[in-house]
């Protein structure tokens, strides 16, 4: 009996030890295992909501889907929003309150500068360096401030002039090489019942392409750079810009644009071009995937792209350089407010967008220029995009579209003035007067209230108001 009692104590003791070991082991599990089961939700806002953006949306939805399969603990809330609403309204207010999405598509250059100054955008410099990505990008100029990288371009673009070769041949017209030759082309087209330029300006920026080309041709690139930096002694109301705006006004009066241009969409403008109602179209290469027809008219779906010619916007004088507007303006930024778990997940997803496979799809399916150094076959992209590539390779100069280098406040006046000129509500002098006024107000305000953090840690923005919800580094 005594030996049985002894064995009973031994068994009880062993049981207690075993249970203790299990509890200690459970209490000291590797925290990484727990994190793997933690759910992370990333919010990602894009503006690929238009018809011509569908290929890009499909590509990114595939990338996000593959990422979520490989990271079952991460859910990506993928939200689409109209570009103008996102850029000019929603994101601006979110940046003031410190509540932007975790990841978002945006434009580089002047548009993101105030976000970078206010520490709302994540500094990606270390990420790019650690993952060996910096040398892969073609151009990070528009995403770099004070030697820090605040976003990464997802695509490049160019804004050439497209024209209908069939219409030109019928009327005996040649490719215009100068503005004077383009003026004659416009007149011949109008005399023969064609709308010279297809324009859908409901988003305001398409008409600004005409304005910035004319401003560049009349004044060159140095003037806008000085104005965009607020340098003393420079004024939008100068003789060369006045002549450029007057030239645009002459086109409006000559009927170069449809009367409903300001209320027309991009898709409606492209339809005018592809249906042979308008002879020319000035916009970015992102619209090329809509250059087709589905009816049985003279330009069939399979042959219309063969009838499209691509040329640079004409120069002021014969022999002058025909620089092309474009650049690596569209990219992705991350909020600076992400905690470590979200930050790691967001950076991993961001890296997935810059593989050769994804960038190749952007070229062949989206007909966009790749943002990383990548060789591709122009013959696989179709005849129009192939011409754009050739044009870019032959071009010796390019410039960033003006709405990407002007501050958001000045850009708003620039777009508004051009739109009202197209609608016949403003003349050239009045539009430049309003543009100069907005520029003067902005730079006076900027110089008197550059964002700074006071002794109490509050951040003040370019408008002099305290930025609520600011969390400094």
Image (cartoon, rainbow, N blue to C red):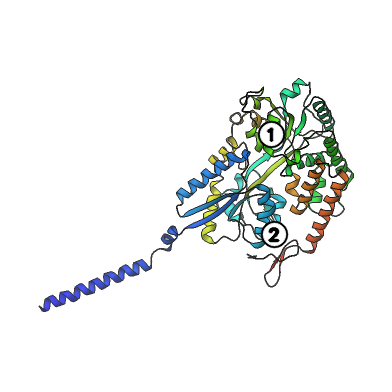
Q: Residue at x 54, y 57 (%)?
A: 343
Q: Is residue 98 shown above or below 156? A: below
Q: Residue at x 60, y 31 (%)?
A: 381
Q: Position of residue 278 (x, y in %)?
A: 74, 30
Q: Is residue 442 shown above or below 175? A: below
Instruction: Determine contact: label 2, label 1, CB under 8 Å.
Output: no
Q: Secondary structure at mark 2?
A: helix
Give the quadrant of the C terminus: bottom right
Q: Position of residue 60 (x, y in %)?
A: 55, 44
Q: Which residue is mark 2?
A: 117
Question: For this view, does 26 lie left or right of residue 56?
Answer: left
Q: From the viewer's perspective, is the residue at label 2 or at label 1 nearer?
A: 1
Q: Residue at x 78, y 36 (%)?
A: 259
> How far is mark 2 from mark 1, CA to CA?
39 Å
Mark toward the start of the polypeptide (2 vs 1): 2
Q: Residue at x 71, y 70 (%)?
A: 454
Q: Is residue 110 visible?
A: yes
Question: For this view, does 85 lie left or right of residue 410?
Answer: left
| Quarter residue 336 falls in | bottom right
Q: Which residue is mark 1?
A: 270
Q: Secondary structure at mark 1?
A: helix
Q: Which mark is residue 349?
A: none
Near mark 1 (Cα within 10 A), the count class, few <14, some 14-19 or many ≥20, is: many
């Amino acid at each position: 009996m005594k030996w049985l009692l002894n064995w009973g104590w031994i068994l009880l003791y062993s049981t207690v030890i075993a249970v203790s070991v299990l509890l200690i082991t459970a209490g000291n599990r590797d925290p990484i295992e727990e994190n793997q089961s933690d759910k992370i939700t990333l919010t990602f806002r894009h503006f690929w909501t238009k018809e011509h953006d569908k290929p890009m949306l499909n590509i990114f939805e595939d990338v996000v889907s593959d990422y979520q399969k490989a990271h079952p603990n991460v859910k990506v809330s993928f939200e689409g929003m109209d570009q103008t609403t996102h850029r000019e309204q929603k994101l601006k207010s979110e940046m003031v309150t410190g509540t932007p999405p975790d990841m978002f598509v945006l434009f580089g250059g002047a548009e993101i500068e105030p976000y970078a100054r206010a520490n709302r955008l994540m500094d990606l410099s270390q990420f790019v360096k650690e993952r060996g990505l910096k040398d892969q990008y073609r151009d990070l100029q528009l995403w770099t401030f004070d030697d820090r990288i605040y976003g990464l371009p997802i695509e490049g673009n160019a804004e050439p002039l497209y024209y209908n070769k069939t219409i030109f041949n019928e009327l005996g017209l040649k490719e215009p090489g100068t503005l004077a030759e383009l003026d004659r082309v416009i007149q011949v087209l109008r005399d023969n019942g064609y709308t010279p330029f297809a324009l859908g300006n409901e988003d305001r920026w398409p008409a600004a392409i005409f304005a910035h080309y004319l401003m560049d041709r009349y004044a060159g690139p140095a003037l806008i750079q000085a104005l965009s930096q607020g340098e003393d002694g420079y004024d939008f109301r100068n003789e060369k810009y006045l002549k450029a705006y007057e030239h645009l006004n002459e086109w409006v009066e000559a009927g170069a644009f449809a009367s409903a241009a300001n209320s027309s969409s991009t898709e409606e403008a492209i339809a005018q071009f592809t249906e042979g109602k308008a002879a020319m179209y000035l916009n970015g290469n992102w619209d090329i995937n809509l250059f087709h027809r589905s009816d049985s008219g003279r330009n069939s779906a399979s042959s219309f792209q063969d009838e499209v010619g691509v040329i640079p916007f004409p120069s002021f004088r014969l022999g002058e350089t025909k620089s092309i507007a474009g650049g690596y303006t569209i990219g992705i930024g991350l909020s600076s407010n992400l905690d470590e778990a979200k930050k790691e997940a967001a950076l991993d997803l961001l890296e997935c967008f810059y593989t050769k496979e994804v960038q190749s799809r952007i070229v062949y399916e989206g007909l966009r220029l790749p943002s990383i150094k990548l060789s591709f076959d122009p013959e696989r992209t179709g005849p129009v995009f192939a011409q754009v590539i050739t044009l870019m390779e032959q071009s010796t100069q390019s410039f960033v579209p003006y709405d990407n280098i002007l501050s958001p406040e000045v850009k708003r006046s620039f777009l508004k003035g051009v739109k009202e000129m197209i609608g016949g509500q403003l003349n050239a002098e009045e539009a430049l007067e309003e543009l100069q006024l907005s520029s003067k107000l902005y730079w006076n305000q900027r110089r008197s209230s550059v964002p700074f953090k006071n002794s109490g840690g509050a951040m003040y923005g370019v408008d002099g108001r305290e930025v609520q919800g600011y969390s400094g580094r």
